[in-house]
Amino acid sequence: VQLQASGGGLVPAGGSLRLSCAASGRASSMYTVGWFRQAPGKEREFVSGITWSGAMADYADSVKGRFTISRDNAKNTAYLQMNRLTPEDTAVYYCAGSGARWPSRRVSAYDYWGQGTQVTVSS
């Protein structure tokens, strides 16, 4: 499975972005999708995850109420809608895939990773 993340950019504080994660290859083996982010000098951290059906989603406390994860299995694509962005959201955002049934917050739980897309929020 190959993952391609896109949609990052430079936005002012309070703005919005929508990230996309397109899967190719044996995408049918990927049940859950997660979004992670990594700021300079910091460890990669969980942002959000979603099950195959989309019925269950999980969010880090720092983004809850501002970010929304979704997926379109017909297009093998997952999305992360990010609203009310703050400079603290600045990071490289990665999408990840796993054959597990439920999204995990652990980096090590994911088998497939995209290349990352830069999100920069100016103050």
Image (cartoon, rainbow, N blue to C red):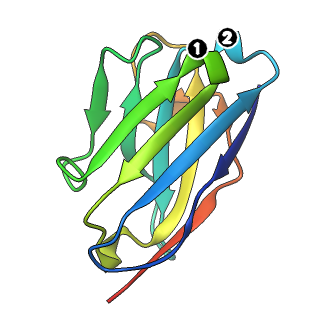
Instruction: Compute the Cα span from label 1 to label 2.
Output: 6 Å
Q: Is residue 107 visible?
A: no
Residue closest to the eye, 66 or 100: 66
The spot of residue 111 in percent (x, y) is 65, 27
13 lies above or below 59: below
Residue at position x 53%, y 33% in the image: 78
Q: Secondary structure at mark 2?
A: helix
Task: Tell me the tag on residue 74.
Answer: none
For label 2, count other residues whose C-alpha is less than 10 Å away and answer few (under 14), some (14-19) or many (20+).
few
* CB-based contact (under 8 Å), mark 1 and mark 2: yes
Residue pointed to by mark 1: 99
Q: Earlier in the sequence, mark 1 or mark 2?
A: 2
What is the three-letter code of the residue carrying label 2? Ser
In the shown orientation, is residue 61 left or right of residue 108?
A: left
Residue 32 screen position, x and y as percent: 50, 21
Tell me what residue is drawn at x 65 percent, y 23 percent: 75
Residue in the image at 64% along x and 56% along y: 116
The foreground one among 122 and 72 is 72
Residue designated by label 2: 29
Q: Quadrant of the C terminus?
A: bottom left
